[in-house]
Amino acid sequence: MVVCVLGLGISAYLTVVHYQGIAPICPAHAGIIDCEAVVTSQWSAILGVPVPVLGLVFFAGMAALQLPAAWRSRRQWVRVARMAGSVVSVGMILWLVYVELFLVGRICLWCTTVHVLTFALFCTTLFGTLATAPEPEAY
């Protein structure tokens, strides 16, 4: 849950930066590290939706699916949605890392932090799902 809150915070910050048209505060700005170049690139939106907005939606949805009540739920769709969201998110961060490294040629430390959080969320979701296999249904 902490990972989702941190991801929501960073996504919210980058969403504000996007809509206000300001440069993000870049913790380090040297050489390949250039947050502004990444968040203002042509790849900073997918189908017209800014990537940070997609991050907000993702982390908000995953936060709901990571609640203790969701983990206790016996509904299969909750388990599938949680795992599917995690898998899709890893695919997304692989694409975004590729974009940063090979298309933009710069790295955003805010984005990298979100990528690490997303991967951590995937790992905890995967291992949590494996560790909490549903009990077989009684006939």
Image (cartoon, rainbow, N blue to C red):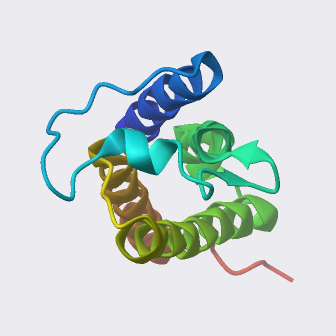
Q: Residue at x 28, y 46 (%)?
A: 34
Quadrant housing residue 21: top right
Judge left or right: residue 139 versus residue 1. right
Q: Residue at x 73, y 58 (%)?
A: 78
Q: Residue at x 56, y 20 (%)?
A: 16
Measuring from the top left, give residue 1's x and y in whole percent. Answer: 43, 38
Judge left or right: residue 14 versus residue 42. left
Judge left or right: residue 9 versus residue 12. left
Q: Residue at x 47, y 77 (%)?
A: 130
Residue at the extreme right: 139
Measuring from the top left, give residue 42's x and y in whole percent. Answer: 62, 55
Judge left or right: residue 72 versus residue 128. right
Measuring from the top left, give residue 53's x and y in whole percent. Answer: 66, 38
- Marker count (numbered): 0
Q: Is residue 100 above or below residue 1?
A: below
Residue at the extreme top: 20
Measuring from the top left, give residue 3's x and y in whole percent. Answer: 37, 42
Q: Is residue 48 above or below residue 99?
A: above
In terms of depth relative to the viewer, which is nearer, 137 or 121? 121
